[in-house]
Image (cartoon, rainbow, N blue to C red):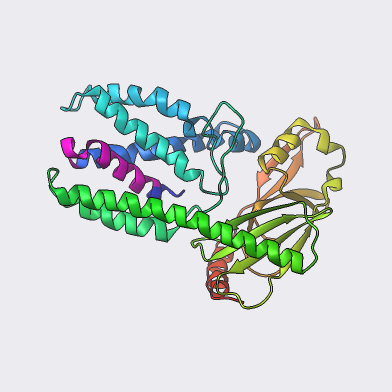
Amino acid sequence: MDSLTQIVLGAAVGEAVLGKKIGNKAMLYGAIAGTIPDLDVLSSFFSDKVTALEVHRGFTHSILFSVVFAPIFAFLVTKYEKYKNIKDWSWLFFWAFITHPILDAQTTWGTQLFWPLDIRLAFKNVFVIDPLYTIPFLFLLILTMRQKKESKKRRFYNSLGLIISSSYLIITLVLKGISYQTFTKELNEQNIVYTEIETKPSPLNTILWTANINTENAFLIGNSSFFDENPIQFSRYPKNHHLLGNLANHEKIKRMIAISKGWYTINKKEGILYFNDLRFGTLSMKSNATNFVFKYKIEIDKNGVPFFIEEPKDKKEGEELLIELWARIKGN
């Protein structure tokens, strides 16, 4: 999830654990702890793209990290804070650490909560930025912050924020199930033969859902709003995996394919190969759009080693997407 959301969640968790004893400092440390797992993005400055993608939401988003580093941070904090109970500080850091990957597991990218086991949890029931989750939570956190640490209202507002936000996540799982039924029914009615389907919410909402469908030679992508009245139109993307040729056997290509969970297409333009990660769709709601959110140019060095270079995103495409998104949410 986005940094603001993780800060809000971390602050609320910190308050729940230690707010009654140290007041707003519990929120402050909870907010800081809630952002620490995302420091794994720094790996992109010291490694190639494939390795950075593998590391992202890995060790720092695991139960192991939370268990090992919570008491370490607690020990450091007690060296300068007046409140010296290491056990209480350890619980604050543990819960702020562990709730971060649990929330991230609701997104498309997911998390390796059980690292070092190669298991990535990705429930795909919320987008990485979801105002309906964050804004009410933030509002109640601000109300909490304004109360005295001994106040019953303080605990009430904070508990309410945690309950509402958690309930919303449960509701999105129900909505995901409904959207899944809608897509599978539509696929059957259109006599589309498929082997796999994955659904996820479109950006910033849980009203409009997107489905990636795996067929023999192509992937299909469709959108369905709960306000739709007409059949779903599916865009078709040929896999073109054969374009990789012998590169398909290279270790780095195999790792990239594993990262995408097999949801990728290859296209060739002016002699250059491009790797498109379909899990995150395109920056457009138009049919058969090709401006993929994550598109990588494949460059080959003199030793025949492939390197992935992420294609830059156009800000205008993002602005256009918001307009198209709003129109599509209202139905087809």
**Which x, y percent locates residue 112?**
55, 35
Q: Nearer the viewer, residue 106 or 145?
A: 106
Drawn side of residue 154 relative to residue 1, left or right: left
Which residues, given as a range, are shown in magenta?
6-23
4 above or below 303? below
Quarter assignment of residue 286: bottom right
Q: Residue at x 27, y 48 (%)?
A: 159
Residue found at x 53% / y 39%: 111
Q: Is residue 13 magenta?
A: yes
Q: Position of residue 142 (x, y in %)?
A: 24, 54
Expressed as whole percent of the image width and height from the top left, the position of residue 151 reads 13, 47
Q: Could you say which is closer to the camera, residue 47 or residue 242?
A: 242
Whether the magenta-drawn stretch holds residue 117 is answered as no
What secondary structure do most residues of the magenta stretch adopt? helix
Res 201 visible:
no
Residue at image x 78%, y 56%?
Answer: 194
Q: Quadrant of residue 87?
A: top left
